[in-house]
Amino acid sequence: MESYSYKITNDGAVVIDDVEIPLSISEKYDRFEHVPSKEEQKEMERNRYFHGVPEWDYIPTGKLQFIFKIEGARGFQKKWADSSIRQLEDIIGKIIIGGIKAAKAYQIEQKDLEEWRRKWQMERLQREKEALRRAEEKRHLELLEDQADYWAKAERLRAFISAVEQSGIERVLKGENEIGIQEWLSWARRHADRIDPLVSVEKAE
């Protein structure tokens, strides 16, 4: 059989295996629907906005109730009260066992909750990591496509420059003036090299 340690604190709580559970011992009340008094009825007739009549009456029973005020531990008894056949003091052992069960259930719930939080944190980090990976992949793809576009543009420019050069040569053979064409061809080729991602910056300059 498992052994448990427990102690009562100065602020009205019990500590069971390191789980602190606030306690409540109070008189039990029965609840009855409130029947307005004659004075209340007169006031309600005189003032329809009168809200001083309670909905319920609470009558002390002279019976004590004991409550373990612990969050969680669902499905476990945490409340006991005097009855017509026995008093709280007659079931102290049962109350202690109930507190031990509630504390044990609370410990299990907290352990499960911590495990859930750990897994959630890991999944969140994994999702963030995957989002960063996808963003990086997208950036690389966009860069690749941009570089391919620039390369294709540079190749089209070179084809055009070659055509211009051939046209210039033909004009020279016909006796036309070649002044300025070589300068333009050099400038055009440098521009094509500048936008070509396969040509180094030093070479383009």
Image (cartoon, rainbow, N blue to C red):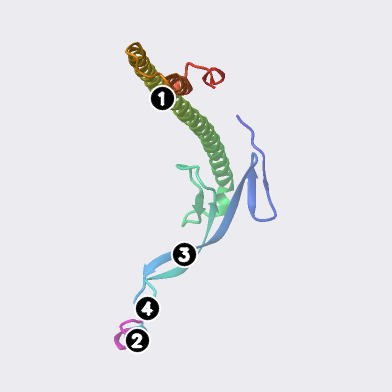
Mark 3 vs 1, N-terminal side: 3
Above or below residue 134? Residue 52 is below
Distance from Cα at disc 2 to Cα at disc 4 = 10 Å
Using the image, tell me which numbered label, if any, was put on residue 51: 4
Instruction: Give the residue pinned by disc 1.
Output: 146
Q: Residues within 10 Å of mark 1 (few under 14, many from 20)?
A: few
Q: Is residue 198 above or below residue 76?
A: above
Q: Circle 3 is placed at which residue position?
A: 29
Disc 4 element: loop
**Number of the label disc, if any, that sits on residue 36:** none
Residue 145 percent location from the top left of the image: 39, 22
- Start-end of magenta stretch: 42-51
> Please, what is the three-letter code of the amino acid marked with disc 4?
His
Residue 41, position as x, y percentages in the image: 32, 84
Say which of marks 2 and 4 sits in front.
4
CB within 8 Å, label 3 to label 4: no
Mark 4 surroundings within 10 Å by alpha-carbon count, few (fewer than 14), some (14 through 19), many (20 or more):
few
Q: Which callout, 2 or 3, points at the residue further toward the start of the chain? A: 3
Quarter of image, res 35? bottom left
Of 124 and 49, the residue lying toward us? 124
- The CA span between labels 1 and 2 is 83 Å
Give the residue at mark 2.
43
Q: Residue at x 52, y 35 (%)?
A: 117
Q: Amino acid at mark 3?
A: Tyr
Mark earlier in primary sequence (1, 2): 2
Mark 2 residue type:
Glu
Image spot of residue 60 (x, y percent): 48, 68
